[in-house]
């Protein structure tokens, strides 16, 4: 029996589930489905959140309200209940009781645990990322339950390596036997990705933590390797945590092309690609027409679809709508994204988008953004806008999904765009590349925003001109995007970089179903 590869995460966007908030969850699912096709004995361990993350609705297009993000019945029907487990504190008292479920997919398995007791702890895990009232308990319980599951996996079938995703789970390596290899993947340059040290974990779990300031350093201190998720992210992370440079490398994020690419076969030429794309655009236009009654017509379809958070600069779209009426009338703008329920700024921006959607004939905002809407928007738009403040985006995968479908991106100089886009060939850049994190509330950030917005509008106008004046040339760039991104962003490349040695031992000819194993957790 092959030893299993284990990825420990706080979220995963399995098909039909509401167990994710954004890019990390989608990435973990893409790795999961990709690993299954390669025949990897791959296990993802994650909490199960009965109420998901959050959903938003604009009731009667008047009132913007929070609703429950629901798991589909099809997803729930695939869960197999395994058993209930208890995890104790170092003093023997109950820390958490959890029901453990398995979601099998070929050689891959997701092990999802639902916290049941104590009620105060279960409440922290009812929704994803609502733990601000007691962050330490959230981190301690997540790490303790995940580690108990991994120890059982190691005993039953063996564990090859454990990859810890993000600092929320930094305590996991301290709770596992020393003979289990652990690695750490950081997905965020921003401060929320590096929460402060949870010192009380020492008493609760009976462990000793290093004298550091953040949970990120807690993880980096003990694991054998540290990965960042793009070259740019690697350079930024080195400046934050120079002590751990010798452990660091990067594996640029990728997508499950099989899951996201709708143009499955190379059409063979830009002209033939244009015909395929127009079919996808017409399909998406029908969706928008059915939802809103609005007609895209012959206008260029431009999308901004991301989590609504300040560093991603959705306000560039607000400024575009309010200050460039001539330009915006030449395009149809699609926006989508969810703000966090505690993010007052993000909720205000979403409300502005909703107002635009209600009052403008060429603007559509979809508040309930998820993998289903992304599937259509990122394959059928003519242009994707990718606008993060430089140094704040670790990687970004929306432009990967778009590019693999021949939708070129106008991007700021950040994240994985720097590795994937060749300006004027398969996409476009605006603004300048920074080399350090700048406080988004600072005067310097405001000046940079003004400069970059001016360049953003200039570049966008030139792309719209190209689309209207020389559609053939525009589709050459779109087709270049399709060809180059398809090669560069395939999740198989990522899995080979993370697990190349293991894959070489496993062999590539094995059918994934042949290595599927039942779980005895």
Image (cartoon, helix red, strand yellow):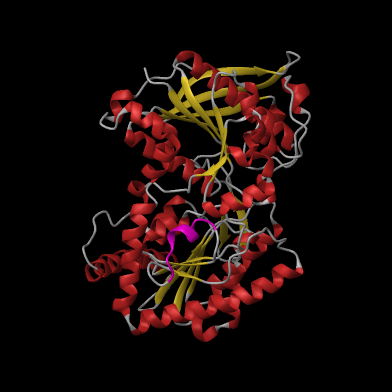
Q: Quadrant of the N terminus?
A: top left
Horizontal placement of 68 versus 426: left or right? right
Q: Residue at x 56, y 77 (%)?
A: 455
Q: Quadrant of residue 210?
A: top right
Name the residue rendered at 59%, 61% in the picture. 312
Q: Is residue 354 above or below residue 253?
A: below
* Location of residue 260 with respect to 94 vertically, above or below: below
Residue range corresponding to the magenta coloring: 415-423
How many numbered tags mark residues here? 0
Q: Position of residue 246 (x, y in %)?
A: 60, 39
Q: Is residue 144 left or right of residue 91?
A: left
Vertical side of 459 occupied by 208: above or below: above
Quick check: 170 above or below 153?
below
In this orientation, which residue lies closer to the viewer: 316 or 363?
316
In the rendered image, the residue lying farthest to the front is: 246
* Residue nearest the viewer, comparing 40 with 248: 248
* Residue at the spot 46% in from the left edge and 14% down from the top edge: 156
- Between 93 and 493, the residue placed more toward the observer is 493
Q: Is residue 124 magenta?
A: no
Judge whether residue 41 can be spotted in this image: yes
- Dividing the picture into quadrants, the one containing residue 137 is top right
Residue 396, image x and y in percent?
A: 51, 54
> In x, y percent, where is residue 202?
76, 24
Residue 125 visible in rendering: no
Classify residue 243 as left or right of residue 113. right
To which quarter of the image does residue 383 belong?
bottom left
Residue 417 covered by magenta stretch: yes
Residue 49 located left or right of residue 398: right
Q: Position of residue 103 (x, y in %)?
A: 43, 30
């Amino acid at each position: 029996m092959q030893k299993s590869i284990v990825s420990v995460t706080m979220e995963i966007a399995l098909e039909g589930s509401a167990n994710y908030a954004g890019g990390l969850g989608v990435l973990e699912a893409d790795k999961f489905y990709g690993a299954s096709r390669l025949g990897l004995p791959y296990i993802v361990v994650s909490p199960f959140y009965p109420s998901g993350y959050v959903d938003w609705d604009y009731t009667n297009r008047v009132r913007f309200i929070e609703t429950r993000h629901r798991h589909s019945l099809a997803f729930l029907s695939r869960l197999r209940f395994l058993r209930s487990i208890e995890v104790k504190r170092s003093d023997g008292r109950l820390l958490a009781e959890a029901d453990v479920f398995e979601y099998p997919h070929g050689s891959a398995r997701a092990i999802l645990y639902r916290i049941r007791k104590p009620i105060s702890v279960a409440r922290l895990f009812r929704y994803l990322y609502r733990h601000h009232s007691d962050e330490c308990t959230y981190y301690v319980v997540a790490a303790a339950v995940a580690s108990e599951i991994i120890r059982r996996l190691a005993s039953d079938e063996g564990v090859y390596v454990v990859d810890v995703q993000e600092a929320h789970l930094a305590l996991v390596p301290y709770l596992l036997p020393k003979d289990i290899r652990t690695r750490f993947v950081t997905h965020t340059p921003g401060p929320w990705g590096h929460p402060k040290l949870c010192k009380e974990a020492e008493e609760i779990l009976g462990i000793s933590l290093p004298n550091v300031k953040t949970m990120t350093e807690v993880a980096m201190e003990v694991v054998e390797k540290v990965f960042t998720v793009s070259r740019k992210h690697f350079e930024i992370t080195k400046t934050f945590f120079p002590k751990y440079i010798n452990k660091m490398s990067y594996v640029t994020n990728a997508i499950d092309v099989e899951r996201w690419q709708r143009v499955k076969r190379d059409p063979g030429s830009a002209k033939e690609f244009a015909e395929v794309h127009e079919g996808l655009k017409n399909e998406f236009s029908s969706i928008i027409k059915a939802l809103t009654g609005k007609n895209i017509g012959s206008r260029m379809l431009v999308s901004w679809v991301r989590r609504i958070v300040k560093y991603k600069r959705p306000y560039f779209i607000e400024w575009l709508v309010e200050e460039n009426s001539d330009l915006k009338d030449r395009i149809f703008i699609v926006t989508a994204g969810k703000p966090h329920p505690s993010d007052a700024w993000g909720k205000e921006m979403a409300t502005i988008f909703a107002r635009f959607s209600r009052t403008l004939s060429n603007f559509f905002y979809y508040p309930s953004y998820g993998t289903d809407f992304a599937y259509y928007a990122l394959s059928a738009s003519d242009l994707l806008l990718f606008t993060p403040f430089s140094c704040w985006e670790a990687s970004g995968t929306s432009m990967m999904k778009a590019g693999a479908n021949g939708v070129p991106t106008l991007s700021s100089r950040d994240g994985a765009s720097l590795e994937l886009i060749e300006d004027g060939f398969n996409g476009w850049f605006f603004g300048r590349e920074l080399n350090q994190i700048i406080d988004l509330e600072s005067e310097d950030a405001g000046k940079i925003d003004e400069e970059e917005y001016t360049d953003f509008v200039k570049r966008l106008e030139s792309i719209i001109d190209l689309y209207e004046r020389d559609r053939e040339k525009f589709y050459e760039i779109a087709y270049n995007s399709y060809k180059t991104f398809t090669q560069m962003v395939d999740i198989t490349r990522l899995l080979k970089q993370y697990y190349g040695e293991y894959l070489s031992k496993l062999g590539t000819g094995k059918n994934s179903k042949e290595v599927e194993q039942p779980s005895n957790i």
